[in-house]
Amino acid sequence: MPVAATAAFHASTLALYFASAFLYLFDLNHHGRAVRWARWLIIVAFLFNTLIILVDWFRQEGIPPIGLREGFALLAWALALLFILVEWGYGISSLGAFVVPVIFFSAAAASIFHPGSREVVREQWNVWLNLHIILVFLGHAAFALAATLGVMYLIQEKHLKQKRFTTLFFRLGAVGELDAVLYRTILLGFPLLTLGMLSGAVYSRIAHGVFWAWNSKELWSLVAWTIYAVLLYGHRAWGWHGRRASFFAIAGFLAYLLAYLGVKFASWLAGQGQTV
């Protein structure tokens, strides 16, 4: 694909994500048909996003080194995919007002940074590493959705306690439904993250001779995995749900941000300092 065509697809994808986010936010306080257009726009944006990623992988002869640019692009793609599936499955259109803006900003951030060749050294690419990357990003996207649902649950709970029955209250959905979808989303993300960590360990053994290096990224990933494991056990053994589950979902996603974005930003800043 020519460079001009790729740039046009990038610009179109960002414009479609932005338009979809705007319509979802507009629909949050209005009872109209905006949400129908928002759904179609994000589906088309996701297809464009998929095409861009596939072309990039074809040029690189596989998944490229994952720097901030690739990380944000994959997060936007995975989050869009899971959001489309969750909204289609459960009909929580209000979720789009919280998630689609994040997708837009993630896709926009991907265009700011340079490709990851300076940030990540490709030592040995094989099926285990490719599998690790795809599974981990899908798991992280599921946890991002769960954290968003947790925020929505806490907002609804506050509305109920204060008896504030505004338009926003009726648009966000029932607390029981939000809690149920939050739990199912974590049930989806937890095995994805677990398999992603295991495939990453196998690759680490092949490439570096150790299954676990105990670096900052791996430690924070383990913290996030433990938080979700405790939540799932608590839900099954002691009936944890609602407010407690929401806080666990949010805490787990914050641990992920420290595990991935924190380390990537630190690496990027160090690289910037070396080039000055």
Image: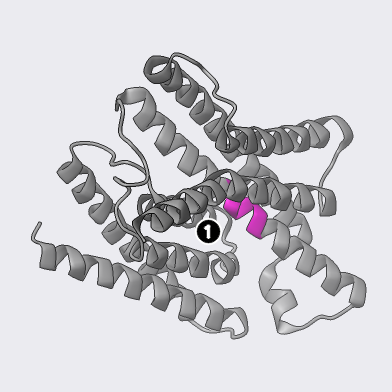
SS for callout 1? helix
Residue where numbered disc 1 is placed: 87
- Image quarter (top left, top right, bottom left or bottom right) of the C terminus: bottom left
Q: Residue at point 8% right, 61% down?
A: 2
Depicted 190 relative to depicted 246: above or below = above
Q: Residue at x 60, y 69 (%)?
A: 94
Q: Nearer the viewer, residue 222 or 262?
A: 262
Q: Is the magenta stretch mostly helix, strand or loop?
A: helix
Q: Is residue 180 visible?
A: no
The amino acid at mark 1 is Glu
Residue numbers of the magenta segment: 143-148
Please report the residue visible at 19 percent of the width from the left and 67 percent of the height from the top: 7
- Image x and y of residue 69, in percent: 36, 55
| Residue at figure coordinates x 84%, y 42% from the top left | 240
- Measured as percent of width and height from the top left, residue 162 is found at 91, 76
Q: Any magenta on residue 29? A: no
Answer left or right for 73 relative to 58.
right
Camera-side residue of 64 and 9 = 64
- Using residue 221 as the reference point, say whether residue 267 is left or right of it: left
Question: Vertical placement of 90 versus 233: above or below?
Answer: below
